[in-house]
Amino acid sequence: MRVLITGAAGFIGSALALRLLARGDQVIGIDSLDTYYQVKLKLDRRDRMIAAGGNRFTFIHQDFSDMAALQDALTGLSFERIVHLGAQAGVRYSIENPHAYVQSNLVGHLNILELARHREIGHTVYASSSSVYGANQKLPFSVDDRTDHPISLYAATKRADELMSESYAHLFRLPLTGLRFFTVYGPWGRPDMALWKFAQNIFAGKPIQVFNHGDMYRDFTHIDDIVAGLVACLDNPPPDDGLEKAGGSTKPHRVYNIGNHRSEHLMKVIGLIEEAAGRKAQLEMLPMQPGDVHRTFADIDAISNDLGYEPTTPIEVGVPGFVNWFRDYHRL
Ligand SMILES: NC(=O)c1ccc[n+]([C@@H]2O[C@H](COP(=O)([O-])OP(=O)(O)OC[C@H]3O[C@@H](n4cnc5c(N)ncnc54)[C@H](O)[C@@H]3O)[C@@H](O)[C@H]2O)c1
């Protein structure tokens, strides 16, 4: 199969590309290599994909929010599937730079939908986020719950992506699957996320910032489980049969949660990092940050029942694995 992956130099995109290349697929990876976090890490991920894929991997350095340039860059290339993972990620940065989110997540998402429409792509899988649940109190979060009270612009753009996708599934019968990821972590992860920042400061002997005084819970999901779920979705396009699907659509459009189905206390995760690093963290206790939520917890019944998704990596295994990778990557 020939698959176009957007955000291919990103954390999730590169991990998915490696999995698809390992099973023999051809991958075209698009990424603008933006400077939201260190470009060196993105280039290292790109080099891994080139080494693994050889001539089955094509990398295109391109901003997909520029439609004309995107079409030019893809001229002469064909693909049967799209996995759209490129986005301006991060909740906190959306308060500082809202326009980056509108450009990449709204204009960019429309461009990918248009590409899928005009190229009659058999299935497009796209990234949404657990942040669409806002400050919902009902736990675990289910794809049947209301998601119309986002508490950050990032969440609002991800919810908008789902709604734009629904309209394209209706108008053009485009098969689409949206995935609400829950706090993804693991090797080759993201430097703007808590686990990375914690590991970095613990190794450097600097204090770590612990928001809401440590009273936070996240459904930490290991990258291997995310990739397994992505592949299961990719291989199972939603049928256009008029029946109601996960997330409530009667169009060929499913929306799934993809989490670990365990809501872990932040202090427990910090303890696991300390143990794996062999050092104690200095804690700087701080209040809740604007846009942040107290707790996330994924109800994964829909994806489990439809596709047999079953996460297999508990944090007791995944967190030490991440810390070991972090140590090796930085030669600490
Ligand atoms: N990692 C998580 O915990 C998490 C949780 C919820 C949702 N998500 C979503 O999953 C997707 C992948 O996340 P990730 O963790 O791999 O993030 P990432 O930042 O590592 O990867 C995104 C990649 O997209 C690229 N990109 C951004 N805007 C672009 C544009 N306009 N054109 C081309 N490339 C562009 C970036 O350069 C980056 O390499 C994103 O849509 C993100 O919002 C991630």
Image (spheres, rainbow, N blue to C red):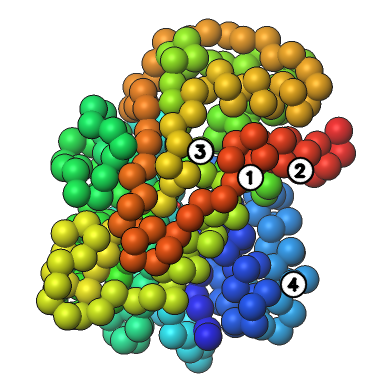
Q: Residues under labels 2 and 4: Cα distance?
A: 19 Å
Q: Residues under labels 3 and 2: Cα distance?
A: 17 Å
Residue tagged 2: 325
Q: Earlier in the sequence, mark 3 or mark 2?
A: 3
- The amino acid pointed to by label 4 is Ala
- The amino acid pointed to by label 1 is Gly
Residue tagged 3: 220
Q: Write the residue at 67% across / 40% down.
A: 317
Q: Residues under labels 3 and 1: Cα distance?
A: 10 Å
* Circle 1/circle 2 CB separation < 8 Å: yes
* Circle 4/circle 3 CB separation < 8 Å: no
Secondary-structure class at tag 2: helix
**Quarter holding residue 46:** bottom right
Secondary-structure class at tag 4: helix
In the shown orientation, is residue 262 left or right of residue 39? left
Question: Which numbered disc covers residue 52?
Answer: 4
- The amino acid pointed to by label 2 is Trp
- The amino acid pointed to by label 3 is Phe
Q: Earlier in the sequence, mark 4 or mark 1?
A: 4
Residue tagged 1: 186
